[in-house]
Image (cartoon, helix red, strand yellow):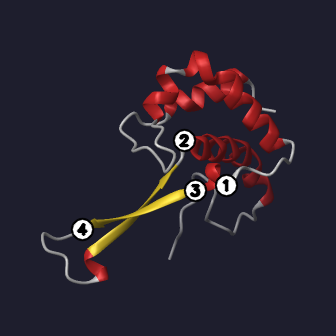
């Protein structure tokens, strides 16, 4: 179970320039208000790791199209980006940190993806 300190480290590691997700709360809000919200966030993380279904709002993502050219005319003139909620980012980073310790032992040495330091060779 992630500790409050581990969760705080993740919150502080999120880029301050990242855009707020669909809930409107930015990483700066979480970082500046951490002393007030840390117990609620820790409880939400604990619930997630205990198997409680995540509220839909945690999983909500806004897809935004960023133009690649000055006057876009077709879909290929855009790059889509997903704006995820900070709570979602926290959970994803926690899962990544947990899995990154185990994956090298679970994935065959012949597999190059998803393991740090293994490169795809042609």
Dot placed on the residue nearer the N-terminal end, 2 or 4: 4
Q: Residue furthest top?
A: 35
Q: Secondary structure at mark 2?
A: helix
Residue named by callout 2: 86
Which residue is nearer to you in this view: 13 or 41?
A: 41
Image label count: 4
Which residue is nearer to you in this view: 13 or 113?
A: 13
Given contact means CB atoms under 8 Å apart, are the residues at marks 2 and 4 in contact? no
33 versus 26 height, above or below: above
Residue 1: image x %, image y %?
82, 33
Q: Is residue 105 left or right of residue 77?
A: right
Q: Residue furthest bottom?
A: 74
Residue named by callout 3: 60
Q: CA distance from mark 3 to mark 4?
A: 23 Å
Residue named by callout 1: 56
Q: Residue furthest right?
A: 50
Question: Callout 1 environment at 10 Å: few (<14), some (14 to 19), or many (20+)?
Answer: few
Q: CA distance from mark 1 to mark 3?
A: 6 Å
Residue named by callout 4: 67
Q: CA distance from mark 4 to mark 1?
A: 29 Å
Residue 86: image x %, image y %?
54, 41
Dot placed on the residue nearer the N-terminal end, 3 or 4: 3
């Amino acid at each position: 179970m992630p500790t409050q300190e581990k969760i705080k480290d993740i919150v502080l590691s999120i880029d301050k320039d990242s855009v707020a997700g669909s809930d409107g709360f930015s990483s700066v809000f979480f970082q500046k208000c951490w002393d007030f919200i840390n117990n609620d966030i820790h409880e939400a993380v604990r619930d997630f790791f205990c198997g409680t279904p995540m509220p839909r709002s945690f999983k909500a993502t806004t897809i935004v199209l960023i133009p690649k050219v000055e006057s876009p005319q077709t879909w290929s003139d855009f790059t889509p980006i997903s704006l995820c909620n900070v709570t979602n980012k926290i959970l994803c980073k926690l899962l990544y940190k947990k899995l990154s310790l185990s994956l090298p032992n679970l994935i065959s040495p012949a597999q190059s993806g998803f393991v740090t330091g293994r490169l795809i060779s042609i």
